[in-house]
Image: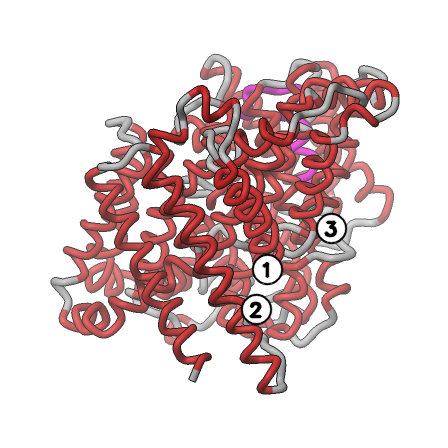
Amino acid sequence: MIEKISDRVAGLLAAALTIFQIYTALYMPLPGMAQRAVHLGLGLAIVYLYYPKKRPEKLVMKNLSYIFGIFCALLALTACLNVALNWGVMAKPMRLAIPWKSDKIFGVLLAILVLLGTKKVTGWAMPLIAMVFLCYAYFGSYMPGMFKHAGVKFGNLISMTYMCTEGIFSSILGVSTDQVFIFLLFGQLLETLGGSEFFLEWANSGFGKLRGGPAKVSIFGSALFGSISGSAVANVVGTGTITIPLMKKVGYDSAYAGAVESVASTGGLIMPPVMGAAAFIMADIVGITYWQVCLAALIPAILYYLALFVTVDLRARALNLRGIPKDQLPDGKKLLKEYGYIYLPPLLVLIFVLGVLQYPAYRACIYCCILLLALACTKKKLRGVLKKEWYHILVKTAKSSMTVIMACACAGLILMSLQTSGLILKLSNILIAMADGRLWLLMILVMIGSLIMGMGLPASACYIILAILAAPSLVALGVPTIGAHLFVLYFGAMSAITPPVAMAAFAAAPIAEEGAGKIGMTAFKMALPAFLIAFCFGFQPELLMIGSWYSIVFVFVNCVLGVAGMSIGIQGYINHKVNIPERILWVVGGILLILPQIALTIAGYVLVVILYISARKRGVTI
């Protein structure tokens, strides 16, 4: 009985949260602090009612688990509604300086609830980091050497945590409130109305007939779906169930099929125009528009997928694979005629409204949601889906936002602790000292930190921490701000295909019927050209659309050729098997073309031309 009540209430609160977000996106009737408080209060209540998904088996313990969840949900709602209703009074200078006893009680309770709620959704990594920095802020006077500071008084810590826009209710939570949620609604609408199936079928109609067609379908479909979903694991599960069996059917081995889907799905996190939740948070932290983030990420994303495309094509050549027979492929023209007018216009309008009209991201997206609903209603089948699934769309959207909401709230605690203790100003100096002032070494250190951090955290949570802790040190050594933030996002995402954890590989393993370790190692090798491109953010701002158009084109062409050369060397095949010395030379040539110095670029061209002529003399067509 109590289980049904808890689940029913969680569903109603989830629907209420989505309706609240739609209303505020259209009308924005509340002050920012009040809006964030309602957003977090509903989100926390849903977390405690919905998690953990696996309850104790014994009936008594199971009921106690639900009772504890209901109790925590009520506390969270009370603490957050107190802020939403009384913030005008709480924000007075005297009360901020000397918080009331009730403020301290609610502040401590909400901080604990946020930490425990984040643990339920993301695991222990992020809450532990937040607790360490909170302790550091309070006990700073006991720290040794350069880490010592005066320490933050308990009252000040509470007022900033609970009563200001510098703690739990920081601008980072504002990104979740104002922008991310509406894009999650757009993604949920697309998925429920069959958009993901349409894009996958459409990709199949165009690429399925090509050599090794299903692998290319996986690349194109995962790029589209992953950009909207913002989760490599969700992307693997969503598209991999179709593409991996198809890849195995045409001749790719299990590990390779799983690796292709893992790499393709991971790239969706850096593929415009959506890029998941992290892009919105990045725009807020860096202080630029969301559209500028998308433009900066465009060339790296193209190069990422180009490297993967060349790799799977060479593999198909080596195995003499064919595409799917034409009579087994969907009719692309028929698909466009029947469903293209429903799914494509909202994405095109989103790009136009963001890029040309320069509307705020949340406003552009809510208009696209309305357009998608209007177009879907012209189809009887989709009207039936909406009529049947409207409540589930509201609930699923809210539940899918839990990771972002909790990560943003917990990140506010981390950022507040770093700012009040002054550590945020020291961290850059510490990292730069460790690298001895050498940018390439600092980038390696940050890469390692990003990969390790990403193993235990979702992409958005990982990016938030790295943006606070690591990105400023890269900026201090001359990396463009957007480049530094894309660098940490890039490698935080790459952790999904980097052993030993490689969560995308683990998601692909049961579908491919292959070991996750083998899939992870294969995926890691595939993605090596992309790793090098990320390092060039610091040395070639042209990759981020910074510079004159001709310099951007020049660098882009060099990187395209470099990626192709590295892919040939890694794959070990052109139209014949390439021996070990030649493979090394192809990789070296590709690296030289991608690296920024003009002398290295010329050397790369010379080496690649020599290798090309050598291949031609053997009768090989590249």
Q: Quadrant of the N terminus?
A: bottom left
Front one among 248 and 171: 171
Please indicate whether residue 326 sits to the left or right of residue 596 in the image.
left
Q: Residues within 10 Å of mark 3 (few under 14, many from 20)?
A: some
Q: Nearer the viewer, mark 3 or mark 2?
A: 2
Mark nearer the N terminus (3 vs 2) = 2
Q: Which residue is mark 3?
A: 525
Q: Which residue is mark 1?
A: 120
Mark 2 touches mark 1? (CB < 8 Å): yes
Residue 537 part of the magenta segment: yes
Percent from the top left, x then y, of residue 444?
A: 78, 31
The amino acid pointed to by label 3 is Lys
Residues rendered magenta in the picture? 528-544
Main SS, magenta residues: helix
Percent from the top left, x then y, of residue 323?
A: 50, 66
Mark nearer the N terminus (1 vs 3) = 1
The amino acid pointed to by label 1 is Lys
Mark nearer the N terminus (2 vs 1) = 2
526 to 489, vertically: above or below: below
Front one among 264 and 141: 141
Res 372 → quadrant: bottom left
164 to 176, vertically: above or below: above
Q: Which residue is mark 2?
A: 52
CA gap between label 3 and label 2 equals 36 Å
Q: Quadrant of the C terminus?
A: top right
Percent from the top left, x then y, of residue 140?
A: 76, 26
The amino acid pointed to by label 2 is Pro
274 to 155, vertically: above or below: below
SS of the residue at dot 1?
helix
SS of the residue at dot 3?
helix
Res 610 → quadrant: top right
